[in-house]
Amino acid sequence: MTGASAREGLATRERDVLAADVRDALEGARTGSRTRLLGSLAAGTADAYSDIDVE
């Protein structure tokens, strides 16, 4: 793995963890709340530059 692809992989993993944390916080704020990912994260096509879209 090259330096650039290693950094991209790390950024992607960090974003996935952050997305899960955001969803947990939103769902925990109100009993019965549910969230879902939108866009490239939901489609499985996210790259290192994709943002986090949550509904």
Image (cartoon, grey):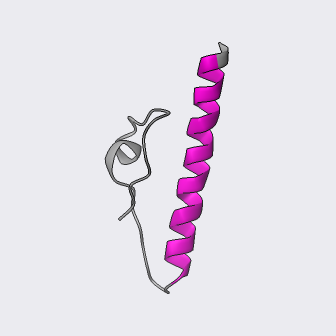
Asked whether, in this view, residue 29 is left or right of residue 54, the answer is: right
Dominant secondary structure, magenta:
helix
Above or below, 3 relative to 14: above
Q: Residue at x 59, y 62 (%)?
A: 21
Q: Quadrant of residue 1?
A: top right
Q: Report whether 6 appears left or right of 23.
A: right
Q: Residue 15: where, in percent of width, then height?
A: 56, 46
- On screen, residue 9 above or below 14: above
For the C terminus, the image quarter is bottom left
Which residue is pictured at 56% across the width and 68% down the height? Answer: 24
- Number of labels in the image equals 0
Q: Is residue 13 shown in magenta?
A: yes
What residue is at 39 percent from the left and 56 percent from the top? 37
> Horizontal and vertical percent for residue 3?
67, 17
Foreground residue among 8 and 33? 8
Question: Which residue corresponds to the image point at 64% horizontal and 27% vertical from the top-left?
Answer: 7
Residue 55 seen in render: yes
Name the side, left or right, on which 2 lies relative to 52: right
Tell me if I can see residue 1 in this picture: no
Q: Which residues are magenta?
A: 4-29
- Residue 41 picture quarter: top left
Measured as percent of width and height from the top left, residue 54 is found at 39, 60
